[in-house]
Image: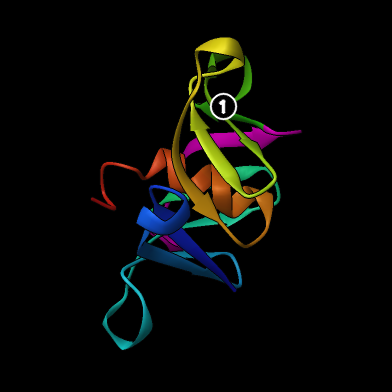
């Protein structure tokens, strides 16, 4: 289980959770499932109706998959960044596994 935060440090707020490969908007009893992740693949939706929207590999977060994927962010030591290299900015924090952190960035608009 992991907790997804918007922002960082003292100003961060909980916006979602992950549990067993499921990604939730909200937390506790009021949470709603919005996606799933399995190893390096991130899905929108769940079960048979899910679709691939991104991938995560070695700290790099991609939108899309395979040859058509595009770098959109990075994850490093519980911090999630939009962009990469010197131009990246912090969008949130995550205290679970790295693939869940990648999901935070891909679902950033849904978690607002």
Comparing 9 with 47, the one in front is: 9
Question: Does residue 90 appear to the left or right of 38 in the view shown?
Answer: left
| Above or below, 80 relative to 69 | below
Residue 23 in which image quadrant: bottom left
Identify the residue shown where x is 61% and y is 14%. 85
The answer to whether residue 71 of the structure is visible from this angle is yes
Q: Quadrant of the N terminus?
A: bottom right
* Magenta span contains residue 38: no
Q: Which residue is mark 1?
A: 65
Question: What's the magenta region?
Answer: 45-59
Q: Residues within 10 Å of mark 1 (few under 14, many from 20)?
A: some
Question: Does residue 45 appear to the left or right of 81 in the view shown?
Answer: left
**Image x and y of residue 22, in percent:** 50, 66
| Above or below, 29 relative to 50 | below
The answer to whether residue 24 of the structure is visible from this angle is no
Question: Does residue 45 appear to the left or right of 74 in the view shown?
Answer: left
Q: Secondary structure at mark 1?
A: loop
**Image x and y of residue 59, in percent:** 70, 34
**Image x and y of residue 26, in percent:** 31, 69
| Above or below, 52 relative to 72 | below
Q: Can you name the residue that lies furthest to the bottom here? A: 29
Residue 51 in which image quadrant: top left
């Amino acid at each position: 289980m992991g907790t997804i935060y918007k922002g960082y440090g003292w100003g961060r707020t909980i916006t979602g959770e992950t549990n067993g490969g499921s990604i939730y908007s909200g937390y506790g009893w009021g949470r709603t499932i919005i996606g799933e992740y399995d190893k390096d693949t991130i899905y929108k939706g769940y079960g048979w109706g899910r679709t691939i929207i991104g991938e995560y590999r070695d700290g790099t977060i991609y939108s899309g998959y395979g040859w058509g994927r595009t770098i959109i962010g990075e994850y490093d030591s519980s911090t999630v960044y939009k962009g990469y290299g010197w131009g990246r900015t912090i969008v949130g924090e995550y205290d679970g596994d790295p693939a869940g952190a990648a999901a935070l960035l891909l679902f950033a608009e849904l978690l607002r």
